[in-house]
């Protein structure tokens, strides 16, 4: 069977798949990705390990082999996300698909009325065709071709789903999930699942359900297209898993319990409000379930999942101690609430960002476990504007169009719905869910049937027949298999994160693309409104308009949340996650850290001491600044990474500062000085005067009188006594008064390495002094005088300096400068 | 007012909010209002009450404010600061402040809150708590976010634009930045105000404050002319009852003026209790280098704390000039032997001075235009102009 399906699907789809595949990467948002990775990398190991167990707990529920479920779930998510990305492409392709496969679904353009009809509605528990799985059929091929990882997962091709929905749900759940086609398998497995899943899995573990659905399709997929599949798996490897796992956990909402389907739908309809007016709520809800395309549900789920997952991952990353599974239930619910309140994608993105910060800080200071999350105010995310900005676009799309500005929003919402159908999943909040459950299954199945018949491959038909009879148990078994496979693919690592980002991106793009695509669905879409995910939020805002709402939950002044500045507010500081290096290399090249440091490459302090001596010796003998600088930087880095702030650290910085000073390396010198200033507060060194003097001199160099004043304020009398400091102060006084004679006297007797610093601006001061001299003396001034007062080491250098400035010497006596003639040249320079 | 109950107070707040009476609302949330001293309002947990009467987020703000008064009464300034931060946070975090796009009455409310935020910090400062700078920076961040909201309010009409709040916030930020010595952060703020079309329409009080800070900054940047302009403006327009403010302005205006050749009268110094300057002034106008050094040393801490020590130091140049002028008047010739100056300097107990340094000092004076003339190195003489060899300071530089 597998072979059959494989052959058929690939052949038909491949051709255009290629084109779409290339596009996919473009949609990705690099910075987003990067940021997430960076965060993720910090707690990579933790999150990856943690997530899987977390998933297990729920998923296990007895039915599934724990390990399997985890991986599969995770992968599934990946796929979703991936799918979303691809969806954009698909949107445009949707129609073509229909043509290729003369299937009833899309082309037929089922009348909206069908959906609307209450009779059509099937109770959630009954397995309705699962849209997602079905949808995938067409697309799968395309996915595989794409370089991106999660191809098989994409079970839901949105366009087709409608057709499936039309048909009454096949009574028996599809028996054989994985085996048949990659495409078809998902529905069967899901159907059995969902019923169970919705209730039993309930709040905490919606994810597992999803995971299964998706996972299965993948299996099938593998079957027929092993090579491509593998590729993808590898590609996914890094980001997918962790994120997904997290996502799964989060969703646990109380809401989920009630009815995940509802939940999903609600999320989907971001701007739905307007639509509501047209249609009575109740019926539609029901209707929706029937006709919702796989896309819808899946997309909704995915979109929801992605933000949450990314949040989770990020937070976990930040507060490495806790994985999402450790999160207090209340907090999870809080997260869910936040996403529920989102009206649009933008909102969600913003919410995600804010949530990340909040959760991270909460987890870090441990208040996550102590505060009352139910009272926690939802983050204020949305800028009002965004809504309006978005609206016009969508409203245009909307053919239904109720004109008028006020209507605009409604239009937008409709647009969204449409989009949903056309595979772009606009909003949707976070349920990940089991919700996809029943109705989708039916559809799925139906669809699969149709397809098969269309394609005419026998294997398909046989499969479909098989599917129905399969009992839940069987399905589970199939699932189990699929999971195993998924696992086999391995790389459970941190896929989730990567995916999340992409998914978001994809979503957005899809919004754009989607507008063109799906006119037909409009009618059907209208029903969707009911589930406006933001109903609550809207209600609130509406209420707020009349200023009638008092706080419902007891007000708690969150004063302690306002951390004192010297506290841990910085989020991640090196002291918070101390690592101790194990590297024994004396020398190490400096590499700017782009991710969390690996203890294996970090040297502990004893080794660093050796390193310092080695570098010093090398410097003395070779004077190789490049080498010394690099080595010093790597030493500094290792110290920083390990949070070492001791006398040794001071010594390292002092050493480097001196070396840098000697070679005139401004940047490094300043970095060291900055660090030293901070370090001296904790570990005063005997060289504090020296470096304070250098700082004073540096301020003279930069003519920063403001900082100079500040520095003076903090000079203690003892410090003023210091040889270096007093010298620097005297020099400063001379400099401030333009007393070049004294200035250069002091320059000649500069202590320690001060002369190196003064060298930086000695030329400048010489010019100034020379200008004064030339203006003052008449008719001439001997070069010797200039040489001595400007502290030139010898007459020749002085003459060279003078001639370099174009000074005119007295014609009668070359040892004298003709001041009048020369003054012009200096003023111009 | 000082003895109202909590309920009365809350009703007043509610009323103020309902009627959009920003000024009154501001008073009710300020720390200069008598209600702060009202023990009946100093509750350790005012949340419940506030919640019953007010809507979010006002309830939280008021609750935080009340708890802040409680904390202050208990001299727990850290706690007070935290509470106050919550209060100030609100407008900045976008809740109410951003929501009311078309209104600027919130601006009024902001003012006292920011001020009291600063006050809480000052009190902290007095208590010698460590890390106050950090606290201030944090506060600056809060204010900065408020400022951004104000500055970016391009939509509302000029009358109710939140831009009217800009200058106030800028001044508060200046205050903090000067305190934590981050003058470079002022630049963007100055630019923002300079480019504002409301620049000259803000209230005089705000403008005086603004000019005071900008003048100070100009002085530190050695732009004395500009500093004189700004500081003079603020001194002249400062309200006559604000003696303390005038004194503050004078602390910076005096050195600038002296550098530009305008010496303050003793009467003025006495009036504003700035007699630290008396000796300096006297020394400079007499060319008494010795006295100047003594005066500077004597009041060094005061001058350094005010940040004007370096500026006053520059007065030495003027003192040299005046000293040398005396030498010139004594010798009554246009060709002055350098030795004469050396003697004069030695009389002033300048250490380790030699003929080269005399030449150097003279060279500087000539270069800067304080003396008209030239030095003949060959003859070791200063030859001064026959007309006006020591031009008046105000005409120089």
Image (cartoon, coloured by chain):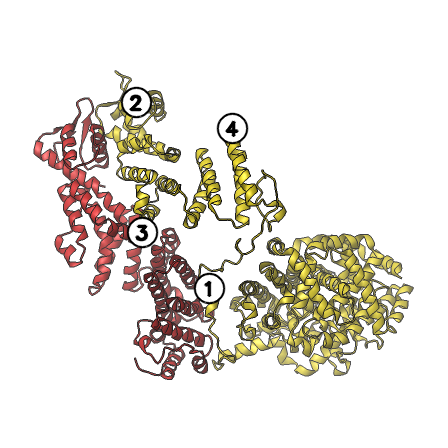
Chain colours: A yellow, B red
Same chain under badges 3 and 1? The reply is no
Q: In terms of image quadrants, where is residue A416?
A: bottom right
> Taking B50 as reference, is A319 above or below it?
above
Q: Compare marks 4 and 1 and give the one earlier in the sequence.
A: 1
| Mark 4 → mark 1, Cα distance in angstroms | 51 Å
Q: Compare marks 2 and 4 and give the one earlier in the sequence.
A: 4
Chain at tag 4: A
> Residue A396's x, y, as percent?
61, 67
- Which numbered disc, 4 or 1, marks the residue closer to the eye? 4
- Which numbered disc, 2 or 4, marks the residue closer to the eye? 4
Label 4–label 3 contact, CB within 8 A: no
Q: Which mark is residue A621?
A: 4
Q: Which residue is disc 1 drawn over?
A: A563
Chain at tag 1: A
> Residue B102's x, y, as percent?
43, 70
| Mark 1 → mark 2, Cα distance in angstroms | 67 Å
Q: In terms of image quadrants, where is residue A773?
A: top left
Around disc 3, counting alpha carbons within 10 Å, would you say few (fewer than 14), some (14 to 19), or many (20 or more)?
Answer: many
Q: Which residue is disc 3 drawn over?
A: B217
| Mark 2 → mark 4, Cα distance in angstroms | 44 Å
């Amino acid at each position: 069977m597998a072979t059959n399906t494989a052959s058929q699907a690939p052949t038909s789809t491949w051709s255009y798949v290629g084109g779409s595949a290339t596009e996919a990467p473009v949609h990705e948002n690099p910075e987003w990705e990067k940021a997430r990775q960076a965060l993720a990398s910090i707690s990579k190991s933790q999150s990856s390990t943690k997530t899987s167990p977390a998933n297990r707990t729920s998923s296990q529920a007895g039915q599934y082999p724990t390990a399997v479920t985890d991986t599969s779930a995770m992968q599934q998510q990946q796929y979703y996300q991936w799918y979303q990305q691809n969806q954009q492409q698909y949107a445009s392709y949707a129609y073509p698909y229909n043509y290729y496969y003369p299937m009833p679904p899309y082309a037929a353009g089922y009348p909206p009325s069908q959906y609307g009809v209450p009779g059509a509605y099937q109770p959630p528990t009954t397995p309705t065709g699962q849209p997602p799985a079905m949808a995938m059929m067409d697309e799968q091929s395309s996915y595989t071709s794409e370089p991106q990882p999660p191809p098989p997962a994409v079970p839901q091709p949105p366009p087709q789903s409608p057709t499936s929905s039309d048909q009454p749900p096949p009574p028996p759940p599809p028996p054989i999930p994985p085996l048949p086609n990659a495409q078809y398998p998902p529905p069967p497995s899901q159907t059995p699942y969902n019923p169970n899943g919705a209730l039993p899995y309930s709040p905490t573990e919606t994810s597992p359900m999803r995971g299964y659905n998706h996972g299965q399709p993948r299996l099938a997929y593998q079957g027929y297209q092993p090579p491509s599949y593998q590729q993808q798996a590898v590609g996914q490897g890094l980001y997918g898993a962790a994120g997904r796992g997290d996502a799964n956990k989060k969703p646990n909402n109380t809401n989920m319990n009630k009815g995940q389907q509802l939940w999903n739908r609600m999320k989907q309809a971001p701007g739905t409000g307007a639509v509501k007016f047209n249609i009575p709520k109740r019926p539609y809800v029901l209707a929706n379930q029937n006709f919702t395309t796989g896309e819808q549900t899946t997309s909704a789920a995915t979109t929801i999942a992605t933000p949450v997952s990314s949040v989770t991952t990020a937070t976990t990353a930040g507060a490495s101690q806790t994985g999402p599974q450790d999160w207090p239930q209340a907090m999870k619910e809080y997260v869910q609430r936040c996403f529920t309140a989102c009206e649009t994608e933008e909102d969600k993105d913003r919410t995600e960002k804010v949530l990340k910060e909040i959760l991270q800080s909460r987890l870090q200071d441990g208040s996550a476990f102590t505060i009352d999350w139910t009272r926690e105010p939802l983050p204020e995310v949305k800028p009002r504007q965004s809504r309006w900005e978005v609206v016009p676009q969508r409203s245009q799309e909307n053919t239904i169009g109720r004109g008028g500005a006020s209507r605009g929003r409604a239009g937008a919402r409709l647009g969204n719905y449409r989009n949903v159908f056309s595979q772009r999943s606009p909003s949707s909040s976070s349920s990940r869910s089991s919700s996809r459950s029943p109705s989708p299954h039916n559809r799925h199945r139906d669809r699969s049937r149709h397809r098969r018949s269309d394609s005419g491959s026998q294997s398909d038909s046989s499969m479909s027949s098989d599917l129905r009879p399969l009992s839940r148990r069987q399905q589970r078994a199939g699932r189990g298999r699929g999971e195993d496979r998924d696992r086999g693919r391995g790389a459970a690592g941190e896929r989730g994160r990567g995916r999340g980002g992409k998914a978001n991106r994809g979503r957005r793009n899809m919004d754009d693309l989607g507008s063109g695509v799906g006119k037909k669905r409009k009618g059907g879409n209208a029903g969707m409104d009911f589930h406006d995910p933001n109903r609550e939020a809207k209600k609130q805002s509406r209420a707020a308009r009349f200023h009638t709402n008092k706080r419902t939950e007891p007000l708690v002044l969150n004063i302690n949340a306002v951390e004192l500045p010297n506290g841990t507010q910085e989020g991640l500081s090196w002291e918070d996650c101390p690592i101790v290096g194990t590297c024994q290399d004396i020398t190490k090249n400096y590499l700017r850290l782009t991710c969390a440091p690996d203890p294996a490459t970090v040297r502990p302090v004893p080794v660093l001491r050796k390193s310092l001596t080695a570098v010093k010796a090398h410097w003395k003998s070779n004077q190789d600044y490049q080498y010394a600088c690099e080595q010093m930087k790597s030493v500094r880095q290792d110290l920083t990474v390990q949070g070492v702030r001791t006398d040794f650290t001071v010594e390292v910085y002092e050493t480097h500062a001196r070396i840098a000073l000697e070679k005139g390396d401004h940047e490094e010198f300043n970095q060291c000085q900055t660090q030293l200033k901070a370090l001296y507060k904790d570990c005063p060194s005997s060289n504090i005067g020296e470096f304070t003097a250098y700082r004073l001199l540096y301020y003279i160099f930069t003519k920063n009188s403001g900082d100079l004043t500040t520095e003076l304020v903090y000079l203690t009398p003892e410090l003023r006594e210091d040889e270096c400091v007093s010298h620097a102060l005297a020099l400063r006084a001379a400099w401030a008064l333009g007393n070049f004679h004294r200035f250069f006297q002091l320059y000649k007797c500069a202590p320690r390495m001060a002369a190196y610093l003064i060298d930086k601006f000695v030329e400048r001061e010489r010019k100034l002094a020379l200008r004064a001299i030339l203006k003052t003396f008449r008719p001439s001034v001997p070069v010797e005088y200039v040489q001595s007062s400007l502290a030139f080491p010898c007459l020749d250098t002085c003459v060279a300096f003078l001639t370099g400035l174009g000074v005119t010497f007295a014609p009668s006596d070359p040892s004298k400068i003709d001041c009048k003639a020369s003054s012009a040249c200096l003023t111009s320079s | 007012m000082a003895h109202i109950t909590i309920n009365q107070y809350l009703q007043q707040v509610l009323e103020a909010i309902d009627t959009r009476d920003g000024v009154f609302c501001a008073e009710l949330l300020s720390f200069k209002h008598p209600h702060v001293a009202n023990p009946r309002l100093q509750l350790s947990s005012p949340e419940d009450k506030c919640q019953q009467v007010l809507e979010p987020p006002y309830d939280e703000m008021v609750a935080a404010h009340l708890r802040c008064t409680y904390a202050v009464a208990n001299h727990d300034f850290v706690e007070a600061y935290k509470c106050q931060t919550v209060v100030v946070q609100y407008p900045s975090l976008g809740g109410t402040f951003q929501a009311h796009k078309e209104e600027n009455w919130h601006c009024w409310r902001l003012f006292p809150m920011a001020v009291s935020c600063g006050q809480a910090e000052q009190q902290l400062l007095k208590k010698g708590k460590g890390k106050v700078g950090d606290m201030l920076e944090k506060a600056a961040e809060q204010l900065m976010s408020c400022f951004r909201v104000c500055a970016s309010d391009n939509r509302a009409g000029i009358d109710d634009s939140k831009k009217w709040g800009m200058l106030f916030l800028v001044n508060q930020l200046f205050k903090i930045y000067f305190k934590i010595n981050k003058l470079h952060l002022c630049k963007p703020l100055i630019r923002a105000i300079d480019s504002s079309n409301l620049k000259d329409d803000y209230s005089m009080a705000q403008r005086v404050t603004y000019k005071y800070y900008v003048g100070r900054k100009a002085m530190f940047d050695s732009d004395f002319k500009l500093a004189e302009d700004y500081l003079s403006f603020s001194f002249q327009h400062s309200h006559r009852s604000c003696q303390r403010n005038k004194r503050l302005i004078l602390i910076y205006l005096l050195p600038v003026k002296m550098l530009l050749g305008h010496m303050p009268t003793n009467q003025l110094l006495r009036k504003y209790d700035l007699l630290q300057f008396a000796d300096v002034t006297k020394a400079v106008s007499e060319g008494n280098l010795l006295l100047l050094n003594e005066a500077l040393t004597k009041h060094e801490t005061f001058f350094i704390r005010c940040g004007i020590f370096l500026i006053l130091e520059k007065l030495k140049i003027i003192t040299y000039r005046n000293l040398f002028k005396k030498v010139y008047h004594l010798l009554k010739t246009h060709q002055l032997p350098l030795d004469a100056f050396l003697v004069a300097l030695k009389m002033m107990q300048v250490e380790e001075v030699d003929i080269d340094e005399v030449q150097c000092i003279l060279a500087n004076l000539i270069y800067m235009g304080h003396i008209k003339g030239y030095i003949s190195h060959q003859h070791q003489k200063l030859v001064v102009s026959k007309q006006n060899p020591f031009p008046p300071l105000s005409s120089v530089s």
